Amino acid sequence: MKSTVENLNPTRVKLTVEVPFDELKPHFDRAYKALAGQVNIPGFRRGKVPAKILDARLGRGTILSEVVNEAVPAKYSEAIGEANLLVLGQPDIEVTRIDDGDALAFTAEVDVRPEITLPALGEITVSVDDVEVAETDIDEQVEALRERFATTTPADRPAADGDLVTIDLAAEVDGAALDEAATEGLSYRVGAGDLVDGIDEAIVGLSAGESKTFPTKLVAGPYAGQDAQVTVTVTEVQDRNLPDVDDDFAQLASEFDTVDELRTDLAEKIRRVKNREQGAQARDKVLDALLEITDVPAPEGIVTTEFESRAHDAVHAFDHSEDALNAHIEREGQTREEFDAELRESATKAVQAQLLLDALAEANQVGVDQNEFTERVLFNAQRLGMSPDEYFQRIQEGNQFAAIFAEVRRGKALAQAVEQATVTNASGDVLDVAELFGLEKVDEQDEAIELADEAAALAEAEVEEQLIEEAVADELAEEIAEELAEEIAEEIVAEALAEEIAEEIVAEDIAQAEGDESSKA
């Protein structure tokens, strides 16, 4: 086999491969064996049909198609191995020549991981916000507790902002009632603003048994984005009674006896959360700094795949309704073109981050042990609300083990980068990385594992690496079969006359064999 590599750009190459027919003999043997077991030819046992007979009965083109479908992916994989290419995504393969008895030639264009010159990590300096716990932060948490332990009492008066109401809803579009938009007995806090535009203004002032119709734009379902007339009927109004903030409340809402103890505990919890946020800010800023000073070419095909994945996720959140998504984008003050441009920009950055972190991991020989892999599986299962067994089965069926391995490895590579960078707060103090991520001072190995687990969260939103290795033959077979159909058809036309003559000879042989069997009988 002869192969050459042409660099089309920093992230894409073109392979030209030529395979002599004598190297295809194992593929021909397997093709003949497989086809012989699939056809019934009088006079021959299944699986024992000679190659010459199969050529005549099935056509040489059928044999060549089987051979090429198996050989091209295998030879492609062999060629990228010889060239030491780190490929990304699926190749575009074109069979350029099939000279029966001479050679098979094809080309393959594929994205590859670019060469990246890494910066000195110790020279990176980032600044993060100070961690401050203000009284207003504590007050907000106390108010949240009051909301949680609020009680309600029926109110014989019109609804006001903050009341809890029970409502019925009905909607019409162009005079036609929408059954799927109707609901009864819905509990709603006036002013929450989480239903449709205009509902809060319509409810305020209504007493139990009163209704009001108002115009709005639907945000979900098949009529998303369309103007509608919505009728809201209030069936009950309730006062929300918030408990007083005293020691009795502290005992009700927590394990503490006094409000002072409760506020002290809330302050400590807020500080821990802000420490984590500060650590995440440092992690993100270190990565941004790395991307800013490092030239990371992004393969266009991988960027497009990531963009399409994110676009699918965006419309999935609106029940796959493009109209609903467009209505949401419009409410956010954007056009669809602006939204797509931002989505592509974020996809490009995600791909660049993946490539950069992979390069860092390789340069620093970052590995992943079984415990780290298991911790990530458990973390992902918990995040998705699934049992570990169920999640493990899903990733096994989806062949996602390599993606999770890469996710952990990139997280560890980023953790090492944060450790080597200088991180200061707004006051100018240099921060300890372990303390930054809320870790206790334990031995270095445990600290590294915990820090890696924190940093690995960044990799969750990144594009999955799509290396084509042993599975490439199965993945490409169908695609190559379609591409070869027309080309092999042309080959068959050239051989048609010879095949017709061969078939006549075979027919005579078979007739003779059948005559012999009859005479024996």
Image (spheres, rainbow, N blue to C red):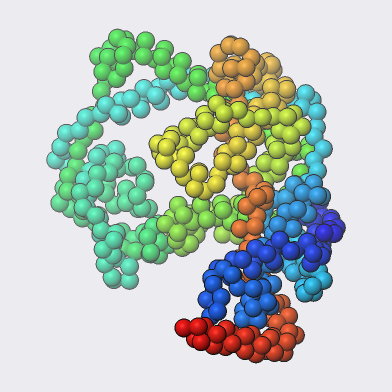
Q: Position of residue 280 (x, y in %)?
A: 59, 29
Q: Residue at x 73, y 87 (%)?
A: 498
Q: Quadrant of the N terminus?
A: bottom right
Closest to the observer, 433 or 459: 459
Q: Position of residue 491 (x, y in %)?
A: 73, 80
Closest to the observer, 75 or 438: 75
Picture quadrant of residue 485: bottom right
Closest to the observer, 254 or 112: 112
Q: Position of residue 109 (x, y in %)?
A: 76, 60
| Left or right: 230, with 67 as reference point | left
| Marker count (numbered) | 0
Visible residue check, residue 354: yes
Q: Residue at x 57, y 28 (%)?
A: 370
Closest to the observer, 354 or 256: 354
| Left or right: 419, with 190 as reference point | right
Q: Residue at x 63, y 76 (%)?
A: 54
Picture quadrant of residue 423: top right
In the image as oriented, which residue stretches furthest toward the front? 520
